Amino acid sequence: MQRFLLRRALLPDGWASDVRVEVDAHGTVTSVTGSAATTGVGGSGDPAGSAVDCDVVIRGPVVPGVPNVHSHAFQRVMSGWTERADSSHDSFWTWREVMYAFVDRFGPDEIEAVSSLAYVEMLESGFTAVGEFHYLHHSPSGDPYDDPAETGGRVCAAAERTGIGLTLLPVFYRHGGFGPGADARRPAEPAQRRFVSRPDVFERIVASTRRHASHLPGGTVGIAPHSLRAATTAEITEIRAVAGDGPIHIHVAEQMAEVEAAIRYLGARPVAHLLDTQPVDERWCLVHATHLDDGEVVRGAASGAAAGLCPVTEANLGDGLFRAREWLDAGGSIGVGSDSNVRIDPADELRTLEYGHRLVDRRRAVLADPYQSTGRTLFDRVVEGGARALGRSCHGIAPGGPADFVVLDGNHPVLAGRDDDALLDTWIFGADARVVDEVWARGRQVVAGGRAIARDAVEAEWFATVRRMGAP
Ligand SMILES: [Zn+2]
């Protein structure tokens, strides 16, 4: 049992002072004393506010860790190598060619080294848990490794050494795209051989992934049918049985080419098709869901599924803009993810999401609740929706949840004179990860003074790995 005293903290019901948090040996919060209702905003009314009996006193402002709902950690090593204009029309699809060309340089050691650096950067910027959408399963020949979850095990190792919470989502990937007939799929391309599995092989991958993840505190395993183009309706239905009660994530409607092909071959838009053919509910995360018609906004929001938004990657790839205002108005849930990891920073994701709407709508505070802070509105939404997408039953700093704390640097010049929601607004719109001072994940300190505890060891391996892999 660890006892924390948080001098000022954002709880699910608001900001509170002198919050006492008890945490068990697994890093799960067992009790929270002090709430906005009892202490009052700006107040310090908790008579138990003394530090007596507390193991850790945190003086800087504390917010809950942000769940990162969608990551392909290995892609971190490609950042900056895909920004040169081609003579042809650059797009998501040309970016994917570069990624495929690079994939064969990854063995298990490279996956662990690159994932570890990505996770260090996530922790240092305020993400405390990650949903790893993991599809690089097989050896470069396309044959499974002796342990079919060898590479997933390395992702678990990266999570363990850095301390980030992990929801591992082994990906079912079978086909190369839509066509040639109705609800038919083209064979996978040779460049996709490391991703592709039959359902029975996929079951073995998931079973072995569970063994690896069982060593992690709070480790969770779900499944991820890659997309409607890589899995048929029947296959998604078949593999759903493997998910148990874990979360189910799927890429959907990221690109207009995918929407057009779905209409042509499935007779419906991708999100509508998914809602028509699968029991989509709170366990599901619809990753991107960029291109929605009015009916899909209403039905998707009502399903309870979280939209897994990755605004920085979506901007980088030129995907388009998710209809966030309409989705939120319809009661929809959202989380954010760093996806391609071209940059890693939750504040950057939220700022990009809001700015996309400001540029299109030509107005400000588009995603804020009426008369509320934009930063606070977005932060609350992605903490709640992100926790759900990662398979957690509660969100924020609350009993039953992980002791995931992000401590802002109250002495940082850019935060001077701010408190509470103004801190969030300034972090998201006026600063960067340099205002993140300490991070605790499952009650374990993983960042001190803005630097991950694991950074030195992880960086040494990263430099050696990048040298060995070379440029694309
Ligand atoms: Zn993705």
Image: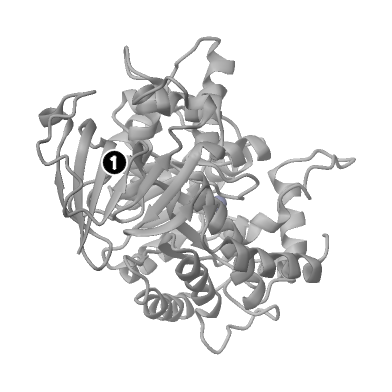
User: Where in the figure is residue 29, as x and y percent of width and height?
Assistant: 21, 55
Label 1 residue near ligand 1, CB within 8 Å: no
Q: Position of residue 44 (x, y in %)?
A: 18, 29
Find residue 403 and report its horizontal and vertical position in percent: 29, 54
Q: Is residue 378 above or below residue 339?
A: above
Within 10 Å of disc 1 (Cα), the crowding (few <14, some 14-19, many 20+) is some
Q: x, y percentage for residue 186?
A: 63, 62
In this image, 327 relative to 172: left or right? left
Q: In the image shown, does 262 or 408 lie closer to the viewer?
A: 408
- Identify the colour scheme used: one colour
The image quarter containing residue 246 is: bottom left
The answer to whether any part of residue 187 appears in the image is no
The answer to whether 468 is drawn above or below residue 431 in the figure is below
| Residue depicted at x 66% and y 35% | 318
Q: Is 191 left, or right, of 180 in this rendering?
A: right
Question: Does residue 412 appear left or right of residue 40 in this picture?
Answer: right
Q: Is residue 153 left or right of residue 240?
A: right
> Which residue was labeled with disc 1?
303
Q: Which corner quadrant holds the N terminus?
A: bottom left
- Which amino acid lies under the numbered mark 1 shown in the image of this protein? Ser
Residue placed farthest to the top in the image?
363
Between 71 and 164, the residue placed more toward the observer is 164
The residue under the point 11% across, 41% down is 48
